[in-house]
Structures are given as structure tokens and as C-alpha cells.
Amino acid sequence: TKRDVCADLPPKIEQVLYCEIVDEQRHLYETLLAAGRQMLAAARETSWERCSAEILTLLLRLRQACCHPELLPPDLLPPDAGPLPSAKLELAREVILEAIDSGHRLLLFSQFTGILKLFPEWLTANGIAYEYLDGSTEDRQARVDRFNQDAAIPIFLLSLKAGGTGLNLTGADTVIHYDQWWNPMVEDQATDRTHRIGQTRTVTALKLVARHTIEERILQLQESKRELFNRVLLGAPGSLSGLTPDDVAFLLEPLR
């Protein structure tokens, strides 16, 4: 039974690691947040459903700003902006180096392929071998097999959608969730790529969260409305099914 299987598995430790977005990244985030509050006020006055696509896009932009400003459309960035900082990218790099130095092997999940593609050049420059898998990857099983069989490859970069289910990656013992998905069950399934039969080591799942942002609010909503998130945003694209105006207001509230 499933209970028997769980009893046979090693422990799973879940931990949240926080970073502080500052300077240009914080200013960009706050600008988007102000626009979001205006949009929410307008939606309350008119039609919630009619504004749902715009509100969903705004929530996406806020989450992208937390992950890395380079994910945002150019028209939302300051004119003539040079390379913009990402506190979360710096945190992820620190965690990766420390984990590898300690003998751990990692899975890094992001829902944004643009985030995954920020790592290969940096990993190569640091002499770190890696595997990569997103929705366009064709030789999926070959990459999975290489990672599981070759301990000299310490990290696997995976898109949450393409790599979060159906794969056996027990060669790793540490999971980094670079960003949060609305439904926490999706993250649990991704962690279970390595926390499964065949795993002999304790598995550590790390969530990277930008403090005082929508990401902290998503964590709180995940816990308070876990059952809701089993259904939310699984309907028609652009639908806010399950998220009420009060939920969106909660996501946009300041966290200071």
C-alpha cells in the first residue's frame, strides 16, 4: 500500500531559504505591484471575470520579477537598463556550490525555462557537469540514465512541467525549487522524482523565496488553501477559477 511505501522511504526534510530583493530589482517589483493594486481596484468596480486574464498576467509578472528581471518583457524594464541583479539567482548559486562541495547531488526545478538557461554557462565556468531537460528535450530517458549512473554529474536542471512527473531521479538527494507554483502538490510531485523507492539517503527539498513579495504570500495561501490549490488554475487558460478578489488582494498586500 501507499502507506507501506512511505514507511520504507528515507526521511524528507523541507526548508524555505529566503533572499532579499533590493535596489533595481526591488524598484521594478514595487512598480509592478502598484500597477497590480490599481488593476485590482478597477476589477472590483467592473467585472472580475472580464479582468481575470490581465490579473493573471500581472501575478505572473510579479513572480517573474522575483525570480529574475530578465524574464520580464523589455517594455517593462527601465530604458537603457544594463544587466539587472537577481538576489534569488545569487542565492541559488550559493546553495548549489555549497551542496556540491558537501557531496550532494541536486535537482533544480523552475517553471521558467528562461531561469534554467541562466545556469549552464555559469556551471561550465565553474567546472560543474550538468544535465538539462525541458519540454523541447527529445532524449529524456538518456539524460535521466546518465545522471543516475554518473556521480560526476552533480546537478540536473529541469522544467517543472516537463520534469516534475514520471521520472526516476534517485541519483539526487537535494531538490531546489527555484520558484513556487500555485498548487503545492505539483512541487511535491517534483520532489518525489528523487524521494521514491530506490532512494537510500535523506532527501532535502529547498524552496527559494524572495522576502516581502508575492512569493511569501503564495506560501501562506498554499498552506491555508491547500485543498483549493488542488483545483485552482487547472481550468481554462486565463481563468481565475478558485481565486477570489480577496485572495488576489491578499497576494498584493505589503509584507513589511
Image (cartoon, rainbow, N blue to C red):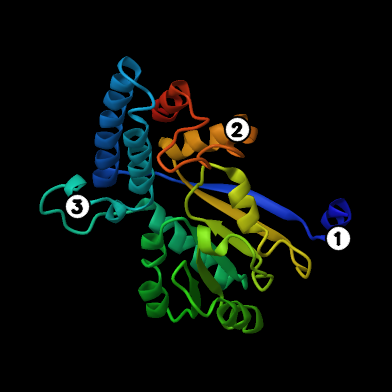
Q: Position of residue 175 (x, y in %)?
A: 59, 60
Q: Is residue 31 above or below residue 96?
A: above
Q: Position of residue 122 (x, y in %)?
A: 37, 72
Q: Mark 2 to mark 3: distance in Å? A: 34 Å
- The foreground one among 175 and 39 is 39
Circles 2 and 3, Cβ within 8 Å, touching? The answer is: no
Kindly give the residue lying farthest to the left in the view shown.
80
Q: Earlier in the sequence, mark 2 or mark 3?
A: 3
Q: Nearer the viewer, mark 1 or mark 3?
A: 3
Q: Quadrant of residue 152?
A: bottom right
Q: Is residue 55 above or below residue 103?
A: above
Q: Is residue 1 above or below residue 194?
A: above
Q: Is residue 30 above or below residue 253?
A: below
Q: Position of residue 30 (x, y in %)?
A: 28, 35
Q: Secondary structure at mark 2?
A: helix
The tag on residue 228 is 2
Residue located 48% across and 33% down the image: 217
Which quarter of the rendered picture does the N terminus lie within? bottom right
Residue located 41% across and 57% down the image: 112
Which quarter of the rendered picture does the C terminus lie within? top left
- The foreground one among 234 and 196 is 234
Give amino acid for label 3.
Pro
- The foreground one among 229 and 122 is 229
Count neighbours of disc 1 (C-alpha within 10 A) and say few if under 14, some if 14 to 19, many if 20 or more.
some
Q: Mark 1 to mark 3: distance in Å? A: 50 Å
Give amino acid for label 2.
Leu
The tag on residue 74 is 3
Q: Nearer the viewer, mark 2 or mark 3?
A: 2
Kindly give the residue lying farthest to the top in the view shown.
45
The tag on residue 8 is 1
